[in-house]
Image (spheres, rainbow, N blue to C red):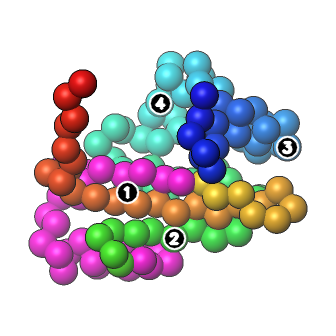
Amino acid sequence: MTAHNSIDPIAMGQALREMGYNVPTFDDFRLNREKYIGSPEDILTCADKSVTNFRAGLMKQTYEYEGYAVDSLEKMQTLFKEEGIVNPEKELEMKPEMIPEIAGNFRIVVRFRRKSSLIRVES
């Protein structure tokens, strides 16, 4: 079950494949991750590839980091340098969110945060 206002990624992938987008199935992705996003450490390349992979229905892609929002990956890289982030691949986590818009289109917000700010909750 998914939380309120969230998108089931498997259902979204199926819907996008039916609309003709080149989106891998979960098994395809799991077996050949590098084909779709590059190496696991290369999060900036991954963020950039979403623009290419979803170009047909993508209305806009933005990037966020600790209250800052920019419209290009180059601006985000400049912000990282200003914030003292030397190696984004090792220092940051990335969470992209696909937000549905009208007529089957969508926008993507890619949120970055420092790995050190992640808190593990024990159950």
Residue type, label 3:
Met
Q: Residues within 10 Å of mark 2 (few under 14, many from 20)?
A: some
Q: Distance between the residues labelled 3 and 2?
A: 23 Å
**Which is nearer the N-term, disc 2 or disc 4?**
4
Comparing labels 3 and 1, the label whose residue is closer to the camera:
3
Placement of the C terminus among the 4 image quadrants: top left
For disc 4, the marked residue is: 33
- For the residue pair 63 and 1, the one nearer the viewer reads as 1
Going from N to C along the chain, the mark reached first, 4 or 3, is: 3
Q: Between residue 4 and residue 78, name the one nearer to us.
A: 4
Q: Residue 62 carries which label?
A: 2
Q: In the rendered structure, are the residues bearing label 1 and label 2 in contact, judged by CB atoms less than 8 Å apart? A: no
The Cα atoms of the two marked residues, 1 and 2, are separated by 13 Å
In this figure, which residue is indicated by the disc labeled 1?
44
Name which residue lies at 33% across and 75% down.
Answer: 67
> Mark number for residue 19?
3
Identify the secondary structure beneath mark 4: helix
